[in-house]
Amino acid sequence: MVSLDVYRGINRVLLVFAPSGEDPDYQHQITSATDYQKELAERDLIVRAFPADDPTADPEASAFRDRYGVPADRFTAILIGKDGTEKMRRDEPILSDDLISTIDAMPMRRQEMDREG
């Protein structure tokens, strides 16, 4: 069974599904994550990308698509919290500001910020 349990309690995960690595929404999402790498890393966010046309892609890509109900011909971005539950799903790129504000509103992130002072 495909699982994100390895990240539970450690990382938040942004799953990025696209029909192609050339898909404009996919490119926008990956570029945005790269541009905000420092801010996202501070929030323990990692990105797992699953372009359907990549022969070198993660061998679990189709299983992840099935688990999250994402057709191979559609762009979808899904934010998974440290608790392993789905926090946000969009059929267009999630702007980094939206991603950061959503994460910062999560109870676990608020606790992290309180500890960081």
Image (cartoon, rainbow, N blue to C red):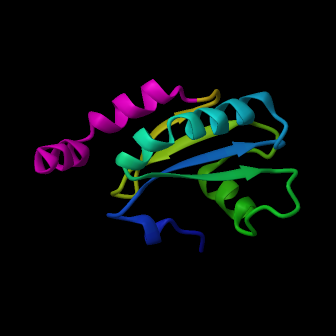
Magenta span: predominant SS is: helix
| In the depicted structure, whether residue 86 falls above or below residue 84 | above
Which corner quadrant of the image does residue 26 belong to?
top right
Residue 29 lies, in percent from the top left, at: 64, 34
Going by the image, does 103 lie left or right of 108?
right
Residue 7 lies, in percent from the top left, at: 43, 65
Residue 1 versus residue 114: which sits nearer the camera?
114
Which corner quadrant of the image does residue 75 belong to?
top right
Going by the image, does 4 lie left or right of 52?
left
Residue 92 lies, in percent from the top left, at: 64, 27
Residue 101 versus residue 72: which sits nearer the camera?
101
| In the depicted structure, whether residue 112 falls above or below residue 57 | above
* Number of numbered discs: 0
> Which region of the structure is painted magenta?
94-117
Residue 18 versus residue 113: which sits nearer the camera?
113
Residue at 65%, 39% (x, y): give it. Answer: 30
Magenta run includes residue 108: yes
Magenta run includes residue 35: no
Residue at 85%, 55% (x, y): give it. Answer: 54
Q: Quadrant of the N terminus?
A: bottom right
Q: Quadrant of the C terminus?
A: top left
Residue 87 lies, in percent from the top left, at: 41, 41
